[in-house]
Amino acid sequence: MSPYPTAILLVVALLMLSSCATTPASSVPVYEGVDRVTVVKPEHIVGDWNLMVLNPREGQHNGHTRVSYTAEGRFTATLPGDADTSSPLSDITLYLQGDWIAADGQLITRNVQVSSDSQEEIAMMLTTLMNEKSEELASVANVYEQSANHLVLVSDDGIATRYERQ
């Protein structure tokens, strides 16, 4: 999967699946952007970002995910639930933290840990499960575009995410 975006997108996908359990799974629409980056500039990564999936699955919620990357190689992310659904996860906000590096035109995340401030049993089960599978939350994303104020990352599974600096 992709670096950090994959970790975030995995959590988003879990939230989506729970809210669309009766809807057949759809494939990710093809992202037709052009890969313009061969070297990722860490100074373009460091900072606070709002994320938006550019090629969401049909019916996929494009929430208010926020990510912060530090110069010390750490990241944190906030993934709010989708209050517009009847999903049992709709009111649960998840928090991710871990490490990041930029290498070979990619953004790589690892050592990802997930938490939630919810005391609901489903939230506790989800965070426990995700932390037990933390190696799978590590991700590699190809950086297609980078500037001081925006990034476009594409995960190995084809999900394109636009980052806008806060």
Image (cartoon, rainbow, N blue to C red):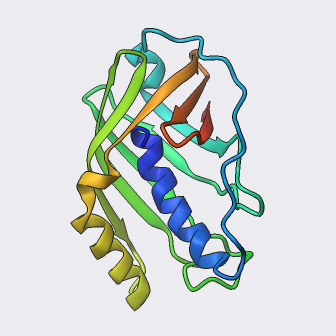
107 relative to 116, above or below:
above
Residue 90 lies in what quarter of the image?
bottom right
Residue 62 lies in what quarter of the image?
bottom right
Q: How many marks?
A: 0
Q: Is residue 142 found left or right of 34 in the rendered image?
A: left
Q: Is residue 48 found left or right of 108 in the rendered image?
A: right
Residue found at the very far bottom of the displayed protein: 121
Q: Is residue 90 visible?
A: no
Residue 147 lies, in percent from the top left, at 58, 15
For image coordinates 60% across by 35% down, the residue present is 166
State the quadrant of the N terminus: top left
Instruction: State the residue in front, 6 or 89.
Output: 6
132 relative to 124, above or below:
above
For image coordinates 38% across by 90% down, the residue present is 121
For image coordinates 61% across by 22% down, the residue present is 149
Q: Is residue 47 found left or right of 138 in the rendered image?
A: right
For image coordinates 25% across by 29% down, the residue present is 72
Q: Is residue 35 found left or right of 115 in the rendered image?
A: right
Q: Is residue 36 visible?
A: yes
66 relative to 153, above or below:
below
Residue 4 lies, in percent from the top left, at 41, 41
Residue 16 lies, in percent from the top left, at 61, 68
Residue 41 lies, in percent from the top left, at 42, 13
